[in-house]
């Protein structure tokens, strides 16, 4: 008989070299995120049978209609981490202001930034959805953190990753020592190691982008997309387009198969659409840890200065050579 796959908890305890004094806390925090994933996956499996599809009638801080499942996913995170001792502050795409948890202070040194339900336009049509998370450590020893303390560069993350809800539920994360993927085994309720030390190919053959925005893009970006679709056997072109409307699902495909995902800046919106702290930064760190690259088109995502929690940024992410090609076109060097 083969060896039974490692569970998430056992893997962190046995394989990850987490700084002394942090191993238990970070392991517990990642386990709690896994619990949230189980609860959200359970709701998604029943979504068409109970009244949790459609919108709430409210608009969130991003100016987007709030789906019922958005609200449920956000509340699930709040419930789990209100009863956890690992997190002292939590910021979410769905909330204008972060939630501070003074009851967990000062023993809790971690702060959590989340997109609780990525791809929520897919909720009503049974397509992939995700959750994205970023963990940073509070540097303030003498007081509770504030909203400004959550706005940190991507290089300051201590853990990051995502949950993918599709044909199976997966948890993919990094703590700066490579990228590992765990698949939820529903019969035993455990995440089992299914993808150890994920490495992204240096170049791929697929791209993901909302090409309906083509007319809004600057010339260099348009030129790059035209290049991707030109036929050239020597460079493996044309690339195949794959776009699901769920950032997690599209980046996960590219993480495993190679290629490039783009949500670039637009002529009238050069700052981009995706949020730096709880979408771009965590996915950038995951992809970099797997050997890939993440860029705004002009600079490394993880080096972008964070100024506020809902800051937006263009995102070009994927195989290193593909991202380098895109940067050259966007910067007018090709």
Image (cartoon, grey):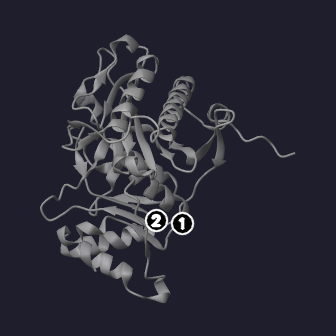
Question: Which percent across, then down, holds residue 57?
Answer: 22, 37
Q: Along the polypeptide, which appears first: circle 2 or circle 1? A: 1
Image location of residue 96, percent across then percent down: 21, 32
Please indicate, yes or no, whether residue 299 appears anywhere in the rendered image: yes
Q: Which residue is denoted by mark 1 in the rendering?
A: 201
16 sits to left or right of 157: right
Q: Which quadrant of the rendered structure holds the N terminus?
A: top right
What x and y, as percent, mark residue 147?
A: 24, 28
At mark 2, the secondary structure is loop
Quadrant of residue 73 within the rendered picture: top left
Q: CA distance from mark 2 to mark 1?
A: 6 Å
Q: Are marks 2 and 1 in contact (CB under 8 Å)?
A: yes
Along the line of sight, which residue is nearer the eye, 249 or 147?
249
Instruction: Tell me which residue sits at (28%, 75%) in the image.
Output: 329
What is the x, y in percent for residue 200?
53, 61
Q: Hey, which residue is sitting farthest right in the picture?
A: 1
Q: Is residue 272 left or right of residue 18?
A: left
Which residue sits at x=46%, y=54%? 249
Q: Is residue 126 above or below residue 146?
A: below
Question: Height in image: 12 above or below 104?
Answer: below
Q: Quadrant of the C terminus?
A: bottom left
Q: Residues within 10 Å of mark 2 (few under 14, many from 20)?
A: many
- Residue drawn at 37 percent across, 85 percent down: 230
**Other-residue count near label 1 (Cα within 10 Å), few / some / many at <14 / 14–19 / ≥20:** some
Q: Which residue does the numbered mark 2 point to in the structure image? A: 319
Image quarter of residue 133? top left
């Amino acid at each position: 008989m083969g060896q039974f796959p490692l569970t998430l908890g056992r893997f962190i305890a046995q394989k990850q070299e987490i700084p002394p004094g942090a191993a238990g806390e970070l392991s517990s925090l990642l386990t709690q995120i896994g619990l949230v994933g189980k609860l959200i996956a359970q709701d998604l499996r029943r979504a068409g049978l109970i009244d949790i599809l459609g919108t709430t009638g409210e608009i969130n801080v991003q100016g987007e209609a709030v789906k019922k499942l958005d609200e449920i996913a956000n509340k699930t995170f709040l419930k789990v981490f209100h009863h956890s001792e690992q997190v002292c502050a939590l910021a979410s795409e769905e909330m204008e202001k972060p939630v501070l948890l003074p009851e967990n202070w000062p023993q809790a040194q971690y702060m959590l930034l989340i997109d609780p339900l990525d791809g929520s336009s897919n909720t009503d049509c049974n397509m992939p959805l995700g959750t994205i998370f970023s963990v940073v450590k509070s540097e303030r020893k003498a007081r509770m953190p504030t909203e400004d303390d959550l706005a940190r560069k991507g290089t300051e993350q201590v853990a990051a990753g995502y949950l993918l809800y599709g044909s199976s539920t997966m948890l993919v994360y990094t703590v700066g020592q490579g990228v590992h993927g765990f698949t939820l085994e529903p019969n035993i309720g455990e995440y089992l190691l299914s993808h150890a030390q994920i490495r992204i190919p240096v170049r791929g053959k697929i791209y993901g982008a909302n090409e309906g925005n083509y007319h809004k893009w600057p010339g260099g970006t348009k030129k790059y997309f035209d290049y991707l679709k030109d036929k050239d056997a020597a460079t493996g072109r044309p690339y195949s387009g794959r776009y699901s409307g769920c950032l997690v699902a599209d980046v996960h495909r590219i993480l495993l198969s190679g290629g490039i995902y783009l949500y670039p800046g637009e002529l009238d919106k050069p700052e981009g659409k995706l949020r730096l702290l709880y979408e771009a930064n965590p996915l950038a760190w995951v992809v970099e840890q797997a050997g890939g690259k993440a860029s705004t088109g002009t600079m490394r995502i993880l080096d972008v200065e964070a100024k506020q929690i809902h800051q937006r940024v263009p995102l070009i992410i994927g195989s290193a050579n593909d991202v380098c090609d895109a940067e050259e076109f966007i910067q007018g060097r090709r």
